[in-house]
Image (cartoon, grey):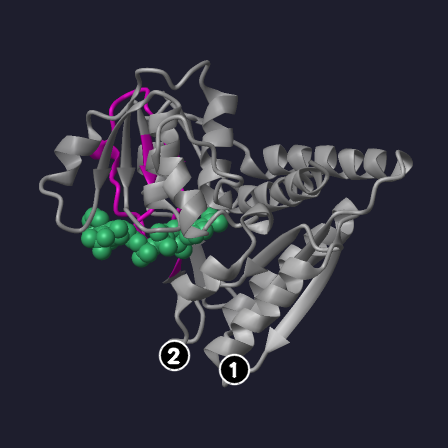
Amino acid sequence: MTAEIIDGKAIAEDVRAKVKVSVAERLAAGKPVPGLATVLVGDNPASQVYVRSKRKACEEAGIQSFGVELPATATQADVESAVRELNQDSRVNGILVQLPLPSHLDEEAVLNTINLNKDVDGFHPVNIGRLAQKGREPAFVPCTPAGCIYLLEKTLPTLRGVNAVVLGRSNIVGMPVALLLVRADATVTICHSRSKDLPAIVREADVLIAAVGRPEMVRGDWVKPGAVVIDVGINRVEDASKKSGYRLVGDVAYDEVKEVASHITPVPGGVGPMTIAMLLQNTLRGAELAEK
Ligand code: NDP
């Protein structure tokens, strides 16, 4: 059996087109244009690329974007006061502090400063806490995990009762995606670097989410026939045949696993494009929350 490819690029484009229509409808109804503010501290080249692509995606969807750039020498007080200013700015419906911050800054304290109803990245400790609690609703859900669940909902009729295995327990992907799966009534196993006999645990999975940052770690013989595989990993591996000298691979050995799984996300073109699509959706939600 060769797996069906879950086309994250096309699904993300569809979400972005819907956000664009909703933004236009808001304008036609005389409502303000939604706004997203990005806060970039320092000159990490990867962060600069991410922020640029998020701002470009906003533009394409008709969302106004505001860029705040602070030098690598910015103090904790500088960053927190920039966030507080954005909290007060009614044109801004979402505030995204690009992580990682330079190591002298206290990331949790900065995230704590963001107004809960503008926390479009969903990383505010209160929003994460609500995600973990039954009967509570976070104002926003983190974008990459939300993108994974969106792809699963497009693929499976329900997640209720499915055995889901999440590889990775990071704050930004593994743990929130596991919490979302629990909320969707899946039975969830979370694995990490201290887990024993990963292949045996993964073989029980109807749904597998791989978010470890280890190139092609999940092999074909780890996967249960017919499983749905969501590969979050983005890893550079050397490839002399490419002009850049490298290519991108996921955490899953795609060529092997696609012969066993029923559905699989490619890398690139799977989860990656969903992250920005969910960010735009969250910013639109921020604009709606501002009217309540
Ligand atoms: P982290 O490095 O923060 O977390 C990795 C997790 O994997 C940790 O929980 C770690 O365990 C676990 N782990 C590492 N090695 C192993 C191993 N050999 N066996 C079992 N578990 C292991 O990574 P992130 O969560 O930030 O990212 C994961 C991947 O997803 C990366 O490739 C990243 O580039 C990608 N990513 C993609 C995004 C997208 O938009 N598509 C967005 C964000 C990330 P422990 O906790 O014990 O250390």
- Decide: few, some or many residues near mark 2? Use Cα within 10 Å; few <14, some 14-19, many ≥20: few
Mark 2 vs 1, N-terminal side: 1
Q: Residues within 10 Å of mark 1 (few under 14, many from 20)?
A: some
The yes-or-no answer for disc 2 within 8 Å of ligand 1 is: no
Question: 229 left or right of 5?
Answer: left
Which quadrant: the C terminus? top right
The answer to whether any part of residue 219 appears in the image is: yes
Q: Magenta residues, as a range?
A: 208-236
Secondary structure state at the residue bearing disc 2: loop
Q: In this view, does 266 lie to the left or right of 283?
A: left
Q: Residue at x 49, y 40 (%)?
A: 141
Image quarter for residue 259?
Answer: top left
Q: Position of residue 258 (x, y in %)?
A: 37, 31
Residue drawn at point x = 41 percent, y = 74 percent: 105
Query: Residue 193: image x %, image y %?
Result: 18, 51
Separation (CA) of disc 2 from disc 1:
9 Å
> In which quarter of the view is residue 25 placed?
top right
Q: Is residue 169 left or right of residue 70?
A: left
Is 213 magenta? The answer is yes
- Residue 112's tag is none
Is the residue marked 1 within 8 Å of ligand 1, measured from its CB?
Answer: no
Picture coordinates of residue 191, whole percent (x, y):
21, 41
Q: Name the residue under label 2.
A: 104
Which kind of residue does numbered mark 1 sit on?
Ala
Residue identified by numbered label 1? 74
Q: Does residue 239 appear in the picture of this structure?
A: no
- Residue 130 position in % (x across, y down): 41, 38
Instruction: Look at the numbered discs 2 and 1 and tell me whether their residues touch, using CB distance below 8 Å.
Output: no
Q: Is mark 1 on a helix, strand or loop?
A: loop
Residue type pointed to by label 2: His
In magenta segment, residue 115: no
